[in-house]
Amino acid sequence: MGTMHIDGHEIPFQENDNILKAALAANIEIPYFCYHAALGSLGACRLCAVEIAPEDPNKKPRVVMSCLEPAKDGINVSVSAAAARQVRQTVIEFLMVNHPHDCPVCDEGGECRLQDMTVACGPPYRRYRGRKRTFTNQYLGPLVHHEMNRCITCYRCTRFYQDYALGDDLGAMRLRNEVYFGRFQEGPLTSPFAGNVIEVCPTGVFTDAVFRQHFARVWDLETAPSICPHCSVGCNTLPGARDGTLRRVCNRFHPEINRWFICDRGRYGHQYSEHPDRPLTAQVSGVKVSYREALAAAAEQIKAARDRTGGLGSTREDLESNAILQTLLNKLSGRFATFSDPQLETATTAAVAALQSSGGAPSLSEIEQADAALVVGDLTTHAPMMDLALRQAYRTGAKLAILHSGPSLLTRFAATTLTVAPHEIGAHLLHLNEQAATASTTSNKHENEKKLADIATYLTTAQRPILIGVSETMAAPEITALAQLANALGSRARLAYALPGANAYGTALLTPTNSTTAMLEAIESGQIQTLIVMGNDPLGDTRLGARWREARQCLSTFIVSDCVATATAEAADILLPVAAWTERGGTFVNYEGRAQGFAPVFQRAEPLPNTAEVLADLAHCLELALPDAAAVLSNIFPGYQAPLPGTLGSSLSAFPLTMQTETPIGSAPLGHPGHWQVTLASWYGDDVLASYAPALVELAPPAAALIHPTAALKERIEDKEQVRLRGPAGTVVLSVQLNNDVAADTIALARVTLAQLGVGHGDLLELERIS
Amino acid sequence: MNDESNRQALQEDLAQLPATDPQRRAAIVPMMQSLQAERGYLDDKSIKEVAQVTGLSTTEVEELATFYSLIYRYPAGRHVLRVCDSLCCGLRGADRLLQAAEKYSGVSLGKVSPDGAFSVLPSICLGLCDQAPAALLDGEAVGSLDEAALQALLQRLQQED
């Protein structure tokens, strides 16, 4: 938009840029603390001083803060001017007056901006000899460690926490040189994005409490570009390892996805790979054996079973492993499936099919630009970073509408919240379709009708409406209804689904139609004798775990490869432990259909093979010639080239999927007396892998039966009362917790409880009072 | 504004505002003042009460309560001497004045004397730079202080009490 001069260089700038922003974009270093590309300028630290030459030669040059000074055409800026350097030096000297100079014992050492800036601009001496101001630190939970004495009052933490992530339990207290960043009272930070304060803090006030337990200096860490395996968003991460163990995970900038931040599940979920129960040695019938022995045993069984072999892939396994497993099964003329629950299979494939025909899902940075959004389900817990993107849209005035059955953190920011039982979601979506089509005539009397009309108005009047569905808690017809709504809104509307698993999109592309049901029936009828399960947990499935456990009894050999000790891994005849995500390379396809490569970060002292290698070794034992992953994938996806780790990723050219079911949305079944509909009450750390991360799990809400106060009153159930829940797989006694975010006739339960009861989202459940 | 009935009236007024009315937040300072007038200071319970009535989070209320130096989060004496220690007064001997105030009153900074009568607090600039070093004694400006003047002031206060 214009050009200015910085120390003689011509620097272009965009409209509304300040000098600092334009300089940084041109790779010119101006020292700064409080400026942050996502949080903007504040002028709190006074470090980014530069000198501007006067337009009138009779006037003197002036020193300004470059983050607050708009870039103007033709101005002459000097970073190196003596006056500006003097200001920066003085600022550093003042900031260091109260800083404890504890770098040798500080976790931030080596990646501390204060350290860097002090070396770069500060005086090489210390003049202050007086007492330093000190603070009492707070306990902020198991994830973030607090050390207030190091603070330089840049306000980045609260600007991120309150202004950007819309959290309300970290603030800037007191005044003068006693400003204190902390909580009202000690306790865990409640935001799902709290861990980002570690990275935004320019010094060591907030540090990683998990990393601290097994600390390494950052310059000793091995790192490589990786992709977060904990949900379908596919945030870019930079894990750090040392001495054969994973120590921490940080954000890695991707301009269209996560940019500067990741959620706490992504930052702390990595502890699964250091869990004491993690399988590290191969086992045959519960006896530890060498990898080769286990492989030979597996090959022998598969040879015996031949075409009566089945293979179950997974949405959390990478694209390569799923494709190779499929190829192996093809060679054996066996059966291949990828999901443990047929409903999840149809919903996920329907979602991917809808995304393919809608022209692709918006990236997170596009979601941030939305001016209206409809969310179906609890987005925060299934795709936390999509929630953070919607919070940015909300901050700029977007109208959020939420259609959900159970608790959801996003309802706090919603203009309209429609809380209905799981079975009624579909009907409401159809209704919304009608409302959007016929610019609503409001003769509505019912409250929900009014809300639907409001939502339709937001969506039809918006320039950039976005519809987001949580596919795990939606049935295929509901997925389709949401896609139809997007279609009806025209090309300006964008459609996205939070899918179940980091590679759910890629896995769905490989999934044969109705494969899960076929697989289960084949096992039950004895057609499949040997089953290879790869990174999946059918025996721990919430809805069908019991059926799978029974089916497992029909199998002669149950071969499992995984990197966590799931119920399935524990029931394996032959267990082949594999490398965790940070220990191997591969490809995940995120919710947009963007294939992103990740690289192995480190090797364990006793390295484990990755799943694709296990399958190749298995094929070798079976004397089958398997092509390598690249050949398999380019065969499936025309023109496929493995995306390089550390790049932006590439969209996958795949044949369009067809919707597996065309079952229309029926009317909601009549309520059975004594029966409640079940909805999943998840939380932001809820994910198969992350549930093995001890620090994160400490924050999991206690198991309870969440019921709406009105429903409780109707059934005369009191808060904290013990109730017995009866499902097809078992009985659970829980205490009731009244919650306004749960729909009528609905009971919201944690995933663990659902698995114990053998019910899934939308199923019916008996509730019995214990008097 | 400083008596019980006014506070109740204020709370009632606030309770009638719709939850989304941005005006609610604006009532926070008068509300904190009136609660302090009644209770002497704002304890954690008061902070939560203010949060509930104004619709702010407890963090936001705590941010404001700890920002304003005339809002007390800890008990203060019936008489409060606030000695300015900002730039002008600092240059003119505020340090010595604060030490003297502690010595003559027998109360350390930020504490309350055993009889509940007296507290000494450092203060942000009082705008009395022309009379530096200056202080506020129970809201009354006193300027051009030295140790002797301060001692006399405190003695008179003790006699009056």
Image (tube, rainbow, N blue to C red):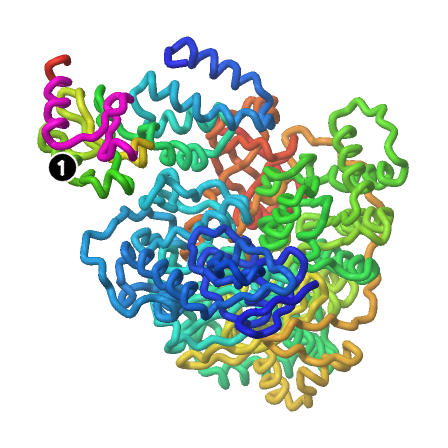
Label 1 marks a residue whose chain is B
Task: Give the quadrant of the C terminus of chain B.
Answer: top left
Question: In the image, residue A432 lies at what x, y percent?
Answer: 81, 39
Quarter of the image where the N terminus of chain B is located: top left
Q: Name the image quarter holding residue A15.
A: bottom right
Quadrant of residue A108 in the image? bottom left
Q: Residue at x 18, y 30 (%)?
A: B145
Residue A27 is one of the magenta-drawn residues: no
- Write the residue at 57% across / 39% down: A726
Outermost top residue: B5
Given residues A573 and B11, the one toward you in this image is B11
Residue at point 61%, 72% (across, down): A10
Up/down of A493 relative to A520, above or below? above
Residue A535 appearing in the image: no
The amino acid on which the numbered mark 1 sits, given as a three-letter code, is Gln
Say whether residue A292 is left or right of residue A435.
left
User: On the picture, is A165 further left or further right than B98?
Assistant: right
Residue A193 placement (x, y as % from top left) = 51, 52
**A233 lies left or right of B114:** right
Secondary structure of residue under mark 1: helix
Which stretch is magenta? Answer: B129-157
Q: Position of residue A590 (x, y in %)?
A: 67, 64
In this orientation, which residue lies closer to the viewer: B118 or A521?
B118
Which residue in the protein does label 1 denote? B99
Task: Note whether A109 is above or below A644 in the view shown.
Answer: above
